[in-house]
Amino acid sequence: GAALQVSDTSASDLIFEVTESATMADPAAALRALEGYRRMGIMISLDDYGTGQSTLTYLKTLPLGELKIDRSFVENAHEDSSDALLVRSTVNLAHALGLQVVAEGIETVECLDFLREVGCDLAQGYFVSRPLPASELLTLCLSNSTSPRTPVRTAA
């Protein structure tokens, strides 16, 4: 809160990523903290979706705006029918709940094409870009802004 007050950054420009394991130690305290961030306008993103123990409960109870499907389901979804079914159904479920979906671990154009086909909102992975220093991120974003491709996200 204090950091936002002294910066030019809007809370709506921020995404706070949380893993299921981070909320398991004290779920009530985690929920209170996340609801506080959400009230400030910060989007809450559930990272590594599919790898934890209580994913459906978290989808129902946490104040989420985004779901990040773990790379272990995404990276072979374009060629593995079980992974494809899991990714497709997760995208549909998340959209039905009003959540944006990010797929992690995209390393091939075939995988990216599959994600476009199933309606995934954002793609993240080495095919898009390796992690970049902030100084190079703007160049990547500008070069992608003229292309009608699926929006992409890279770690800085």
Image (cartoon, rainbow, N blue to C red):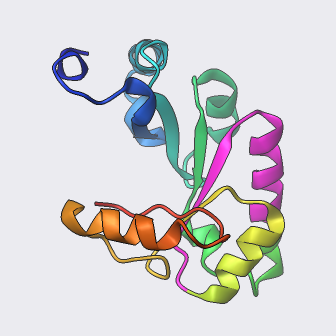
Q: Residue furthest front?
A: 146
Quadrant (top left/top right/bottom left/bottom right) for the N terminus: top left
Quadrant (top left/top right/bottom left/bottom right) for the C terminus: bottom left
Q: Nearer the viewer, residue 88 or 83?
A: 88
Q: Which residues are magenta?
A: 85-107
State left or right for residue 62 relative to residue 47: right
Indicate the quadrant where residue 102 lies: bottom right
Q: Residue at x 48, y 19 (%)?
A: 38
Q: Residue at x 40, y 77 (%)?
A: 129
The reply to whether residue 83 is visible in this rendering is: no
Q: Is residue 147 magenta?
A: no
Residue 126 placed where, x, y %? Answer: 43, 79
Q: Residue at x 32, y 62 (%)?
A: 138
Indicate the quadrant where residue 2 lies: top left
Residue 51 placed where, x, y %? Answer: 56, 55
**Image vertical order of residue 141 relative to residue 64, above or below:** below
State left or right for residue 29 relative to residue 133: right
**Image vertical order of residue 116 relative to residue 69, above or below:** below
Q: Residue at x 63, y 71 (%)?
A: 74
The reply to whether residue 109 is visible in this rendering is: yes
Residue 32 placed where, x, y %? Answer: 43, 12
